[in-house]
Image (cartoon, rainbow, N blue to C red):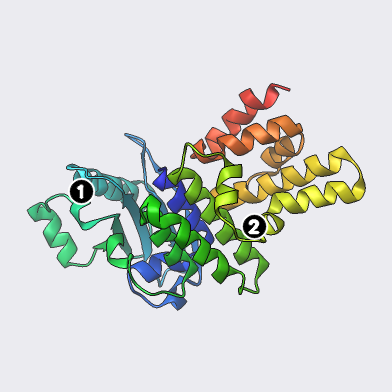
Amino acid sequence: MKTDTLFYQLFQSFHSLLFELIERPISEAEGYEFSSVEVKEKAFRFDGIFIPATNDKPFFLIEVQFQPKEDFYWEFLSEIFLYLNQYRPKQEWQAVAIFARRSFEPEIPNYVREIIASNRIVRVYLDDWLDRETDSFAIAIVQLILSSESQAVAMARRLGEKIEQENDPEIQEQVLELIETVLVYKFPKLSRQEIETMFTYSDLKQTRVYQEAREEGELRGEKRGLVKGQATMLLRLLNRKFGQISPSLRGKVNKLSAKQLENLAEALFDLETIADLSDWLKTQGKAK
């Protein structure tokens, strides 16, 4: 499962998730902008960074680990101090190491223990959250990611029933997108149609952006209306993943054909940076 991409989407959609996981007041999430920043030298990349709009709040450097990795702390500290050297931030900083399971954390070196004791590095173990009762959609998605295949379908259905009660269409759309994405990763041998059949939330397709695009095209009776709607959907997803994309890239996406838009949708989760998107549009985007 491509957990880096999933957690990027989660943090992008729900700024409160980080603060829930480190058990700080959700209100502290106000005023933060989430991004993914590459650190040069060895091209280290954090799984996420929360940057506050003001200097009186700390910024957070996030790394998510879903498998054992003996040199995890060596690399994490390298990323942290390279970032501090390159960007020279004015705010205080705190690093958050998120392990899928406690057993994935390697033995802690002595030099790291001192940093942990100072609260510069906060450790989160997602399996501690697996059986907790929660009203948070973000935490529920995390629980779905950690669930076994035998549990996943029932959990997704319960979450789908819960989201029916949500009055905010944008939150509904975000949660449903994430549920389907998690199921696609958990059941790679099944098609999206099979997953949608398995996941019986009645309004799934009606609340997705591509359905709005399809309806728009049908109302206009024009094929281009559907293509425009598909482009709008992808632009929303791209903005959600990378932040606001440039007018130049937006224009290139709007010029893509229906087939090219379909190809871009399939490639979306493999694109990690704006540069990757730009390269894709220069190469794949030329093929009609």
Badge 1 is on which residue? 73
Residue 235 relative to residue 88: left or right: right
Name of the residue lying farthest toward the right: 221
Q: Residue 120: percent from the left, percent from the top?
A: 24, 63
Say which element carries label 2.
helix
What is the number of the mark on residue 206? none
Badge 2 is on which residue? 204
> Picture quarter containing residue 163?
bottom right
Q: Residue 175: percent from the left, percent from the top?
A: 55, 61
Q: Which quadrant holds the N terminus?
A: top left
Query: Residue 166 or 81: which is nearer the viewer?
Result: 166
Residue 251 relative to residue 84: left or right: right
Callout 2, which amino acid? Leu
Q: Residue 77: percent from the left, percent from the top?
A: 23, 49
Residue 191 relative to residue 99: left or right: right
Determine contact: label 2, label 1, CB under 8 Å: no
Callout 1, which amino acid? Tyr
Q: Which callout, 2 or 1, points at the residue further toward the start of the chain?
A: 1
Query: Residue 239 or 248: which is nearer the viewer?
Result: 239
Q: Is residue 28 above or below residue 160?
A: below
What residue is drawn where x is 21% and y is 43%?
Answer: 69
Mark 2 vs mark 1, CA separation in Å: 41 Å
Say which element carries label 1.
helix
Asked whether residue 63 is in view, the answer is yes
Q: Residue 131: percent from the left, percent from the top?
A: 32, 68
Q: Is residue 263 above or below residue 228?
A: above
> Picture quarter containing residue 129?
bottom left
